[in-house]
């Protein structure tokens, strides 16, 4: 990910957006973010979340539940908004976004300028309309079918601190399976080289799987 502060490039991108007037009305610093295919655009662990509008390229958005099941929420192209929920819920949600190809977004530091954005009626009217459309889509969506092994990997990737599973009973409860079943599948994942055992009831992703988690979740 690369940050771009060139005023001419920013102006060109904003003038091309259908949200031109709304962006200028915020009166806060704007910048651009460029992503390579597979890079994470938004995730709960990000320390400095941004409100972003896609200027070029596409991204995919998905939600990871506590049991590791994944909802593919949507895919977005030019003028798609991402990060608006952080203004209301902080960055503790489980929504992830990933660049599907070369991606360029117009960005605002939503943590630093949260108050200014929330007090801007023009801005709020714009994002509330977008959020309502997204909510309608989500309410009619089912979780993607996945095996328990896939759910275990998603659980370790996205729900475990430092991608380390500690405590079989707690994990089994979250994954809606028995401790014995979880142990058996973890043993299989160890044999396949996807996770490694670090202690009693403790497992972590291997380096290759960690890399894949950022590229092909």
Image (tube, rainbow, N blue to C red):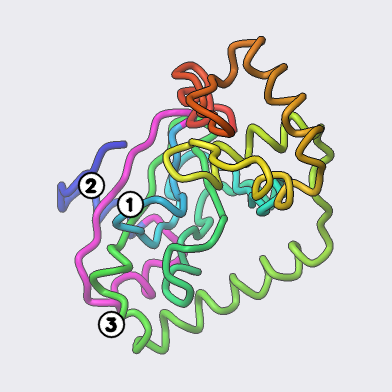
* Up-down relation of residue 84 to residue 69 (above or below): below
Alpha carbon of mark 3 to alpha carbon of mark 1: how far?
22 Å
Query: Do labels 1 and 2 touch, CB within 8 Å?
Result: yes
Instruction: Find the distance from the CA under tag 1 to the CA under tag 2.
Output: 6 Å
Name the N-terminal-most of marks 3 and 1: 1
- What residue is disc 3 on? 116
The 10 Å Cα crowd at callout 1, few under 14, some 14 to 19, many 20 or more, is some
Which of the two discs, 3 and 1, sits closer to the camera? 3
Q: Which residue is mark 2?
A: 9
Q: Is residue 148 above or below residue 205?
A: below
Q: Of the numbered discs in the image, which one, if any, rests on residue 13?
A: 1
Front residue of 168 and 194 = 168
| Secondary-structure class at tag 3 | helix
Sequence-wise first label, 3 or 2: 2
The numbered mark at residue 85 is: none
In the image, the segment drawn in magenta is: 16-38
Q: Is residue 27 magenta?
A: yes
What is the quadrant of the C terminus in the image?
top right
Q: Identify the residue at horizontal 46%, vertical 61% (top origin).
A: 83
Q: Secondary structure at mark 1?
A: helix
Crowd tier of the residue under label 3, counting other residues whose Cα lies within 10 Å: few below 14, some 14–19, many 20 or above: few
Q: Nearer the viewer, residue 183 or 91?
A: 183
């Amino acid at each position: 990910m690369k940050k771009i502060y060139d005023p001419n490039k920013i102006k060109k991108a904003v003038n091309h957006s259908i949200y031109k007037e709304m962006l200028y009305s915020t009166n806060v610093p704007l910048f651009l973010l460029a992503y390579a295919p597979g890079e994470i655009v938004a995730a709960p662990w990000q320390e400095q979340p941004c409100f972003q509008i896609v200027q070029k390229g596409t991204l995919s958005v998905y939600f990871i539940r506590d049991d590791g099941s994944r909802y593919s929420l949507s895919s977005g192209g030019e003028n798609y908004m991402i990060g608006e929920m952080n203004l209301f819920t902080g960055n503790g949600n489980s929504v992830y976004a990933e660049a599907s190809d070369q991606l360029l977004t117009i960005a605002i530091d939503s943590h630093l300028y949260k108050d200014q954005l929330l007090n801007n009626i023009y801005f709020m009217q714009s994002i509330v309309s977008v959020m309502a459309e997204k909510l309608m889509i989500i309410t009619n969506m089912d979780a993607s079918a996945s095996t328990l092994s896939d759910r275990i990997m998603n659980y370790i990737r996205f729900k475990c601190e430092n991608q380390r599973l500690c405590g079989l009973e707690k994990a089994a409860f979250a994954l809606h399976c028995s401790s014995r079943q979880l142990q058996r599948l973890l043993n299989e994942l160890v044999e396949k080289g996807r996770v490694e055992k670090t202690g009693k009831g403790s497992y972590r992703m291997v380096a290759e799987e960690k890399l894949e988690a950022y590229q092909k979740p």
